[in-house]
């Protein structure tokens, strides 16, 4: 039997997995700081539940099968399970309901570079009944900002827009019936030349004057204050537009009051995030020096989470980080600091197994002080033990030789600086803490 | 569409999930303190890889299906994926290799109380090439001890045995050919009367004298020193037996030197842990007051992890905690301390939305000090806001009314004691830290 792992399924070496876990832990920590409660839903659900809302592509990619006489499917995102969860337990939940979920999802895509069939999504959502205050959209912006600061990754920018601006603007131009087509086109604006953009608008049968207005609108630029000023100066007489403008301004202002640096937030009126799910604020996040990564954290405001399952209205706002892909991109770009394959801070080496009691005492004491530590127990030449210590890139070595055993102390070696000194147990703990 | 979750799949409310996450976190923390590196393998594997070693029951329970022309299966434990991982990456790993994995596994059993189809296993294993020092068996014992202390659960005892003792003893009685039958019977000794035990031995065709010796051996009791002394006094002239005796003594002594309380460890010669996987040390863990939970953490020493996949020999020692079942048992027995449905420590309430800047400043400052905090933003009567605060069992309230807004300070209320006082931002942070 050959040991094999399926293509499209990430499997890391310990030194990489440690970094992955640090990232997960930083994300979890940030989400909890903002009051999001953990949620864990099954990977397997009834196929009809998961497919309740899906279109064609999802169904092709989903892992679906029958066990006994039940049609089962593996979840392909964390949003449908959340919609089910809120519908199922809404009487037991307290609203506004803030949850995070970090879990694996499954899509049976053709495997290709940077695409995974099993990958982590790290989601937050804030859900309320009937209405959700716009202030929560600012909070989500603050979460994105803090997460990427905690992750200690390269410079990033959060791009923000409000879907009501474009739809209101189209209404004010009396071309609301073209909204879907225009949205589809706006989504491509960064990838096609201006002339092509205008040409496609023309093909939709829109008059040239309107098209130029539309292009100018999408391309409104400057810092956030300048963009907001230009939008106001348009004097658009449309409720939808003005609601979007007011929401966008509130979100930016409150985020800054929450501690978000204005340098990390940029209004971009070309951001739409698909056609029909989001209804207000939308977010995308890019690394300044790595636009080729695409958006590494996206989301937005939606009107009704659980409409497939129930009549009650649950508006929400949320984001998702595709962690597996992000990790892979960072790793391939050499942007991860990968150290040794162990969480240990101290490795205890004995020159003879007779010194085990003294080694055990030290290991026990270090762990009692919450310092990860290990004793190397393989009985081999001391040189081999040092090779092991170097291979695992241990930060500190505690050596027990004949002299140390006689004196009941340790030689502590800092492997980064090469410094070493004889120390007592208490001194050793203090030195490595 | 009705929102439904499959039977046999645990789905918790936020206040329960928070406790579950605390347990996972305590387990992860302990495993890392002992130098175990995290590992994360796919939930989906090639069916032939997962089923490479399995017997009949596993195959019936496994979730197996075909996608395209590939036979896939969901993992039913974390051991087979580890065996595959070590075989696949053995040239990139440093041995001894210590890994932990906390992940979901799947078994399509008939759902019944206390049985789950999706459940967490929390495993550690220490693997070496060719030989693994017995000292690691003591370390695993110390891990079990520390995990259950960290989890702050009721009094527990770790039962330990060494498989070589019984097999050596049977060899010394010249009935080694009956080992499998005897093991199967010994496994049942706590459930059947002595007479039935002896009767079944007789049915195997063993002479009465041997049977009584066997029963006396299995039932050897007293504290660990007394049992070890009795075993030595037997004077059994068999290498296997004496190796087992020496290993058992080493494990107990070294565990105590690592800080394990002798009161929490008990030699029990009737523990076998199945028929063919374990070859030396075996562990089981029971709560003193809840024997009906069964063993909540079990494992042992095995000779060769990856034999199905390769010729190289990888002996190991490991344990597993079935966390989903344990959580369910603790919850049903009322042994979990379940608090509010939020990680927040402070909730900020404003008497008017006009005070938002002051609320935002406080929330930002609290989070900067790593204190989970939230602002309640739903615009409703103050009484409703207080109802929300009570419902989520928030530890501290920070209230901004007219006076506080004018003075730029806060009223801090300790919800447990009912005490409240006017404080500055810095005082508030100090008080809730």
Image (cartoon, coloured by chain):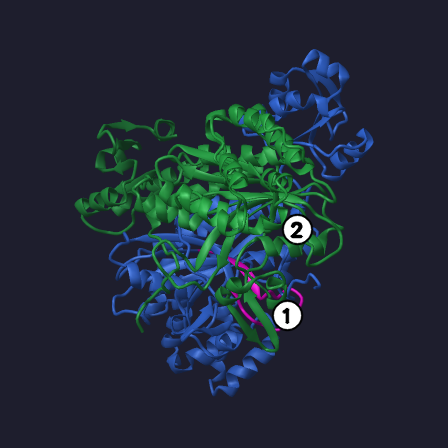
Chain colours: A blue, B green
Give the chain letter at badge 2: B
Residue B305 got which mark?
A: 2
Residue B301 got which mark?
A: none
User: Is B276 placed left or right of B198 in the picture?
Assistant: right
Identify the residue under disc 1: A111
Residue B259 or residue A181, whichever sits in front = B259
Q: Secondary structure at mark 1?
A: loop
Where the N terminus of chain B falls, by quadrant?
bottom left
User: Is A269 placed left or right of B373 in the picture?
Assistant: right
Q: Residues within 10 Å of mark 2 (few under 14, many from 20)?
A: many
Q: Magenta-highlighted stretch: main secondary structure?
A: loop
- The magenta span reads A106-123
User: Is A417 placed left or right of B153 in the picture?
Assistant: right
Above or below A109: residue A162: above
- What percent of the width, then of the height, locates residue A238? 33, 70
Residue A114 or residue A317, whichever sits in front = A114
Residue B357: quadrant of the picture: top left
């Amino acid at each position: 039997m050959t040991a094999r792992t399926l293509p499209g399924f990430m499997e890391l070496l310990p030194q990489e997995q440690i970094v992955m876990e640090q990232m997960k832990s930083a994300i979890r920590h940030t989400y909890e700081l903002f009051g999001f409660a953990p949620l864990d839903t099954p990977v397997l659900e009834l196929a009809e539940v998961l497919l309740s809302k899906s279109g064609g592509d999802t169904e092709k990619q989903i892992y679906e099968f029958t066990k006994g006489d039940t049609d089962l499917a593996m979840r392909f995102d964390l949003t449908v399970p959340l919609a089910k969860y809120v519908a199922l337990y809404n009487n037991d939940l307290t609203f506004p309901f803030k949850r995070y979920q970090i879990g694996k999802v499954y899509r049976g895509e053709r495997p290709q570079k940077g695409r995974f069939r099993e990958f982590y999504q790290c989601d937050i959502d804030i859900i309320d009944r009937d209405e959700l205050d716009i202030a929560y959209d600012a909070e989500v912006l603050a979460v994105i900002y803090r997460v990427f600061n905690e992750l200690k990754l390269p410079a990033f920018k959060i791009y923000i827009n409000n879907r009501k601006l474009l739809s209101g603007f189209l209404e004010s131009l009396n071309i609301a019936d073209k909204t879907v087509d225009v949205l589809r086109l706006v989504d491509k604006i960064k990838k096609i030349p201006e002339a092509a953009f205008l040409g496609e608008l023309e093909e939709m049968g829109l008059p040239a004057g309107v098209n130029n207005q539309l292009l100018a609108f999408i391309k409104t630029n400057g810092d956030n204050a300048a963009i907001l000023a230009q939008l106001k100066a348009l004097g658009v007489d449309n409720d939808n537009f003005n609601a979007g403008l007011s929401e966008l301004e509130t979100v930016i202002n409150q985020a800054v009051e929450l501690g978000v640096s204005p340098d990390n937030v940029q209004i971009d009126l070309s951001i739409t995030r698909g056609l029909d799910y989001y209804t207000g604020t939308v977010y995308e996040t890019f690394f300044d020096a790595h636009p080729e990564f695409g958006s590494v954290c996206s989301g937005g405001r939606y009107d009704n989470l659980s409409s497939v399952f129930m009549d009650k209205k649950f508006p929400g706002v949320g984001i998702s980080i595709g962690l597996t892909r992000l990790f892979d991109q960072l790793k391939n770009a050499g942007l991860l600091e990968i150290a040794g394959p162990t969480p240990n801070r101290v490795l205890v080496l004995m020159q003879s197994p007779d010194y085990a009691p003294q080694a055990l005492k030290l290991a026990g004491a270090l762990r009692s002080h919450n310092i990860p530590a290990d004793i190397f127990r393989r009985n081999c030449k001391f040189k081999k033990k040092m090779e092991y210590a170097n291979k695992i890139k241990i930060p500190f070595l505690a050596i027990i030789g004949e002299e140390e055993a006689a004196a009941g102390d340790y030689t502590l070696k800092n492997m980064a600086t090469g410094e070493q000194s004889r120390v007592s147990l208490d001194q050793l703990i203090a030195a490595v803490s």
